[in-house]
Image (tube, grey):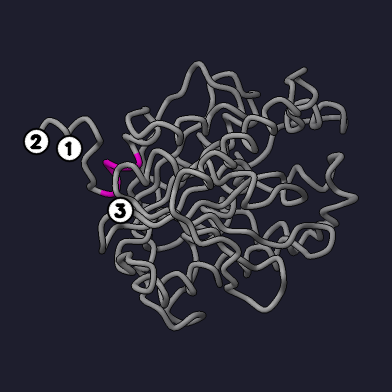
Amino acid sequence: MLYRNFQTQTELDFQYNPGELGLDIPAYMNFYATNSAKVRDKLRCHLNVAFGPTVAEHLDIFPATEPNSPILVFIHGGYWIMGSSKDFNFVAQGLVAANVTVVVVNYALCPKVTIDEIVRQNRSAITWIYHHAESFGADPNRIYVAGHSAGGHLTAMVMATDWKNEYGVPDNIIKGGCAISGLFDLMPFPYTWLQPKLQLTWAEVLRNSPMLNLPEKAGSLLITYGGEETSEFQRQSQDFLTAWKEKGLTGEYLPQPQENHFTAIKGFLDADSPLCTAILRQMNVSSIKLQESRK
């Protein structure tokens, strides 16, 4: 079932607006920004690398310590209306320590652009990374994608791309994805507080709902979300994973029972966290503990 029987916008907003739950959102944003600044100071990085013609289309690249590393492309959240790559650079910390190159994508936001355009920009970013990976010491044949919230939606959308026919790159360019607290059914959003900025048409809802655009073939999918999130956020992920697997695609669920919508990505700070461990396993990369035990 793609939607529930909501009667009012207030009911929908309670489910989809984290601010309605009394969470201290500015404190979480400060946590992201502070840790991102620390990571930029600590790790080697190439910032604001253009992948498209507009100012918003750029990448922050955090190369691994060894050559020919796998790549984790991270797509930030913010309901398609807020946030930037710089707010989420902290996601590089744990994975770079495990010898994974991390690339954080920046993209234009609604209402300046549409969700159609945001999807296109992220697909273009993946294409650029494939063509330029060797220039920053990474392996173009081991690209994985992860995203949080709206970034989880965008992760699913790039995994469903007709890469060969639309971008002239291999169909299996993305080997796997991790969607964290994602949004896979856009049908509720024209009826929420977001609509004045999103300006979603029904055609856009249909084109950009991953639940309605499952690929015939795709890499493995890891789904995770916080156990303290609203029932609708949990339903979105559960329903999408079920549909993904019913399509015959490979999917896995990672529980994070103690986390909320904002803390579900804090595991990126620690290579041995359950989140990083699951992503590294998907990449067939040893965790830090396992690497050290082999020395």
Circle 1 residues within 10 Å: few <14, some 14–19, many ≥20: few
Instruction: Please name which of the two marks, 1 or 3, marks the residue nearer to the observer.
Output: 3
Q: Position of residue 214 (x, y in %)?
A: 49, 57
Helix or strand or loop: what does disc 3 sit on?
Answer: loop
Q: Which mark is residue 65?
A: 3
Residue holding disc 1: 291
Task: Identify the mark nearer the N-term, 3 or 2.
Answer: 3
Viewer-side residue, 51 vs 186: 51
Instruction: Please name which of the two marks, 3 or 2, marks the residue nearer to the observer.
Output: 3
The magenta stretch spans which residues? Answer: 279-283
The quarter of the rendered structure image containing the N terminus is top right
The quarter of the rendered structure image containing the C terminus is top left
Q: Are the residues flagged by discs 1 and 2 in contact, CB closer than 8 Å?
A: yes
Q: Residue at x 38, y 55 (%)?
A: 101
Quarter where residue 63 is shown: bottom left
Please name the amino acid that badge 1 sits on.
Answer: Gln
Task: Identify the mark nearer the N-term, 1 or 3.
Answer: 3
Extreme residue in the left direction: 294
